[in-house]
Image (cartoon, rainbow, N blue to C red):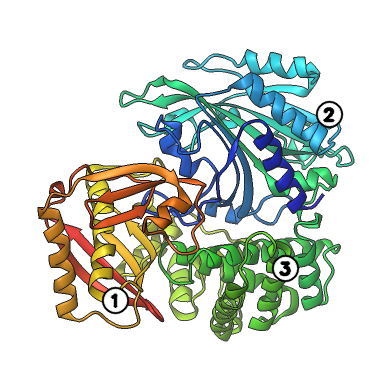
Amino acid sequence: MTHQDIRKKYVDYFIRHGHKEIPSSPLVPENDPTTLFTSSGMQPLIPYLLGEPHPLGKRLVNSQKSFRSQDIEEVGDNRHTTFFEMLGNWSLGDYFKEEQLLWFYEFLTKELSLPKEKLYISVFEGNKDVPKDTESYNIWKKLGIPGNHIFFYGVKKNWWSRSGVPEAMPPGEPGGPDSEVFFEFTEVKHESQFGEKCHPNCDCGRFLEIGNSVFMQYQKQEDGTLKELPKKNVDFGGGLERLVAATENEPDIFKSSTFKKVIERIQDTTAKQYSDEKNKHSMRIIADHIRASVFLIADGVVPNNKTQGYVLRRLLRRAAVKMHDLQEKTNEADFESISEAIIETYKDVYFQEQSIKKITEIIGLEIFKFSQTLDRALKQFEKLSSSELNGLNAFNFLQSYGFPYELFVERSNQRGYPLNDTERVSFENAQEAHKKLSQTLAAKLFKGGLADQSEMTTKLHTATHLLQQALRTTLGDQVRQKGSHITAERLRFDFTHPKKLTEDEIKRIEDLVNEKIKANLSVKMQVMPLLDAIKEGALTVPQANYPEKVKVYSMGNFSKEVCGGPHVDFTRTLGSFKIVKEEGVSANTRRVYAVLN
C-alpha cells in the first residue's frame, strides 16, 4: 500500500467511528514562541486536551506533518527520519482505552491486513505516582494478543509528554501512560551487541514501533505532583512512513515505497547503488534531509542563521557534505532534481504547482552558495592535526566556510578524535564573542513545553489583530498576513507590501492601533463554519489549512479574523502600542516589530 492509500484508509476508518477530520497544522507553529517546529499531532491541540471545547467536537482525526530537529543525529539508520507524517486520532473526554485499543487493532489487522502474530505490545509498568496499566494489558489479551507478546516498561519508554518523563514536565503540561504497538520483521536476526535477548524496544531492527496510544490522564502541578485531569483524553500517534514499511514487510524505511523515487534519483545522480553498504548511510541522510527541507520551505522557512532557518541550512549543508562523500562534488542541479523526486512523491497530497519552482530554486541556491567553499573547507579540514580538532577551529571553519559545528564534530568523530564538552564550550564562547546567533540562543528562546499563553503574550497576540487591520486601513486591502511570531517581549508580523513604510505611514498605523485600544473595544469569539466566516469578511492566512468550523474573533467593528486565540476581553488592557522596527524580508514582504507599554 502507498502512503496515499494508508493515509486515506486511516482517516476514513475513524470518520466512520464518529471522528471529524482536522487539517495538518504548519510545520512552524503560529504564535507559539515555545518551540521551533510542530513535532507531533497533539502539539496544536494542547488547549483542547486541557479542557477547552474544540469547534468540531470530541472526536478528531488527521495526518499531521511533523519535524523533530533532535532526530537529526539519529538519521542514517534504517528507521529514523527528521520529517514524518503522524497519523493521529483524539478523544477529548469521550472514549478511552477500551475503544481506542480495539479500533487501532482493527485498523491494523482488518484495514491494513497486518498479521496479528507479528504485533507486539508495550504498556506502562507503573511508578510511585501512577499505577501499573493492567487495564490495557487485559484489553490487549482480550483482543487476542498473547501474554508473551505484551511487555511492561517504565517511564522512559511508556510515559508520554512533550517534555519526556514526569520529572521533566513543566507545571501545566499534560501527560500520561501509553501503550505502543510494534511490528516484528521476523527475517531480521537479533545481534548480541544489542543485548542478550530481543524485545520490542530493542535497537537491533527486528521490531519497529508503528503506533502509540497515549492516555492523557494527568497534569503536572506547581508542587511537582501529578493530578488527574477532569476529563480523560486519548492522544494517538502512528508514523505513516513506518506503517508503509510494515505493510510492505520492509525493515528498512528507505527501501519502502515512500522513499523509492528519491533513493532512485540519488542513485541516478551519483551512479552509486543503495544496496552497497558503504553508500547507505550517506544516501539515507541525503534522502531524509532534502525531504525535510522541501516540506520546511513549502511552509515558509528559508535558509538563514536564525532559529528555523538555521535548522534548514544545517540540513541542506549536511546533505551537501554527504553528497560530496559519494561523488566528490556537489552542485545545485543534483539537489533540485532530488527535490523534484520528493515533490513528485507527494504532489497529489501537499504541493501546489505554483510553489514547486520556488522550493527547488531555494534549495539550489543554498547548495550553490555552500558548494563554493565546501571543497576548500574539506581540504583544509584534512590538514588539521589531532590537536587542532577543537572548538576554536570549529568556530573558525564556521566563520570562514559556513561549515556548521555539527559537521566539524562529525568529521572529527570519523577521524577518531571526538570533541568533548569543553570544546563545545570553547566554540560557543568564540561564537558569543563575535555576536553570532547560534543554536545556543535558539535553545534559550525556544524551550520545550506548553504553548505560551502568559498575560503579555496574550496581549501581544490581540494587538497583532489590531495591527493587521491598521495596516490594511492605512496601506490598502491588498495587505495580508504572511506570518507572525510572538514572545512575551514583542510581536513580529510579516505582511504583503511592495516597499518600505514611510515614517508618516508608521505613525498613522501606530495612532490607529492606539485609538482602538483607547476605545476599549470588546473582543468576542464565535464558532462558525469557515465559509460563513469568510463571507462575513473574517481574515484568514493565505494558503493556511482550516477545519470546517473555526473560531472567529471580532474587536468591535474594526477587526475580524479566524484565529485559535488566546485574546484579552477588552482592548484597553493592552496599554500603548509602539512599532520599534520595520524591515524587508523578501520581495513584496515587509516585517514589523512592535511592543506594548
In the picture of the structure, the residue carrying the numbered disc 3 is: 344
Instruction: Report, in whole angstroms, how far the alpha carbon at label 1 lies from the one at label 2.
Output: 58 Å
Query: For the residue marked with disc 2, what is the amino acid?
Result: Lys
Q: Is residue 549 above or below residue 313?
A: above
Secondary structure beneath dot 1 equals strand
Identify residue type, mark 1: Glu
In the rendering, which numbered label is found on residue 79? none
254 or 362: nearer the viewer: 362
Q: Specify whether residue 380 is in view.
A: no
- Which residue lies at the image location 70% right of the left edge and 79% below the top edge? 334
Relative horizontal placement of residue 261, taking residue 82 as reference (left or right) = right
Label 1: how many Cα within 10 Å (few below 14, some 14–19, many 20+): some
Establish if 57 lies above or below 280. above
Say which of marks 3 and 2 sits in front. Answer: 3
Q: Is residue 523 in view from this perspective?
A: yes
Circles 3 and 2, Cβ within 8 Å, touching? The answer is no
First in sequence: mark 1 or mark 3? 3
Q: In which quarter of the image is the C terminus?
A: bottom left
Mark 1 or mark 2: name the one nearer the start of the chain: 2
Left or right of 111, for residue 26: left
x and y percentages locating residue 45 in the rendered image: 47, 40
CA separation in Å, label 3 and label 2 = 34 Å
SS category of the residue bearing label 2: helix
The amino acid type found where label 3 is placed reads Glu
Which residue position holds label 2? 116
Residue that numbered label 1 is attached to = 583
Q: How far apart are marks 1 and 3 (CA)?
A: 36 Å
Front disc: 1 or 3: 3
